Amino acid sequence: MNNMFADEVMPLVTVSMPAFNSERYIAEAIESILAQTYQNFELIIVDDGSTDRTREIIEGFTDPRIIKIYSDQNRGLITTRNRIAQLAKGKYLALLDADDRAFPERLALQVAFLEADNADLCGADHWTLNQVTGQLKSSKQRHANADIHALLSVCSPVCNPAMMGRLDIFRRFPYKASYLHAEDYCLWTEIALAGYRFANIKKKLITYRLHSTQTSVNHLQAARNVFSGAQASYLKGLHIPQDCLPRALPFFERLKYGVKFMVLMNKKISGISIRTNQELYARFQFRGNGILTPFTRLERLLVAATASLVGSFKG
């Protein structure tokens, strides 16, 4: 007897879209996924207890690939993201927030990149749209795995809603409630320490929207506090002592601690580019050096080049 589900086509990609009071932007976000050139996906939308017209707007879409889940109470972004990862059927999980927009080739390019085993997770270049001013700003990403791993010591070098990765990774490393307001950065540092490969595709694949109702805008100080704790844990995982924590230091102190940090980082992570090493060392320098600026830039270049050379002789 034939299995009636034998011909069912499982989606290769699950798109994760948590939503909370997103009536202003969610229709555009959903439409941007339905307009993808790559079509073998499911889109899981979880309305997390919205009190505006978000649910009504979601209900207006009838595409069978959309899975709609409604919660009568707000359980929070972390719980919602983890819930979607558990429900997903795809090999890959693609993230997109309900206030952002994906470009038509986004899924196709990321699927091809991951299927070629170029990385375990990949993001992309993107536009950042300031909803208040209307300013559209191009991202300045680093694209190689080594550069991304290195930059995680000072910032989040990937754009969360542009990320796609293997579903099993997101299930192994769920978002943690203790990392509220900086959960994305904390997740990427955990995954990086576990040895997974990152990349950013050299093409703009989403528009990331900035607006006054975002959690990251309204809980900035709380996010910074969580970031600092995760940053310290990441450096510890790389066996870099806390006295080398990147921060602005006077000249002789940064020659001691900053150079030490650079050498240890490049010994731990092979292949960091000189440009990324310059970004790292810049965190140890003060801004606004006036007439001394050419000298601080030269110092930065010399330290970066030396650190890259150290990395090239690793092992």
Image: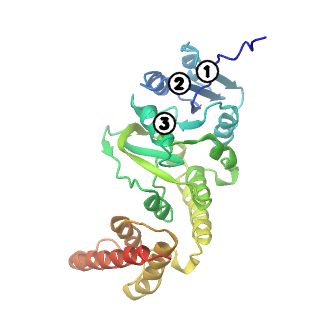
**Marks 3 and 1, how far apart in space?**
17 Å
Mark 3 sits on what residue?
Answer: 111
Label 1 crowd bin: few (<14), some (14–19), many (20+), radius 10 Å: few
Are the residues flagged by discs 2 and 1 in contact, CB closer than 8 Å?
Answer: yes
Q: Residue at x 46, y 45 (%)?
A: 123
Q: Residue at x 33, y 71 (%)?
A: 287
Query: 169 above or below 226?
Result: above
Please name the colour scheme applied to the rendered image. rainbow
> Which residue is more in the foreground, 291 or 259?
259
Q: Is residue 311 visible?
A: yes
* Residue type at the position of mark 1: Val
**Is disc 1 placed on a helix, strand or loop?**
loop
> Which residue is more in the foreground, 19 or 258?
258
* Front label number (2 vs 1): 1
Are the residues flagged by discs 3 and 2 in contact, CB closer than 8 Å?
Answer: no
Q: Residue at x 38, y 69 (%)?
A: 277
Q: Residue furthest bottom?
A: 252
Q: Is residue 246 visible?
A: no
Disc ID at residue 40: 2
Res 193 quadrant in image: bottom right
* Residue type at the position of mark 3: Val
Among the two numbered marks 2 and 1 on one chain, the one whose residue lies closer to the N terminus: 1
Q: Which quadrant holds the N terminus? A: top right
Among the two numbered marks 3 and 2 on one chain, the one whose residue lies closer to the N terminus: 2
Mark 1 sits on what residue?
Answer: 9
Residue 222 percent across, percent down from the top left: 58, 56
**Marks 3 and 2, how far apart in space?**
10 Å
Decide if residue 183 is on the left or right side of residue 3.
Answer: left
Q: Residue furthest front?
A: 1
**Is disc 2 placed on a helix, strand or loop?**
loop
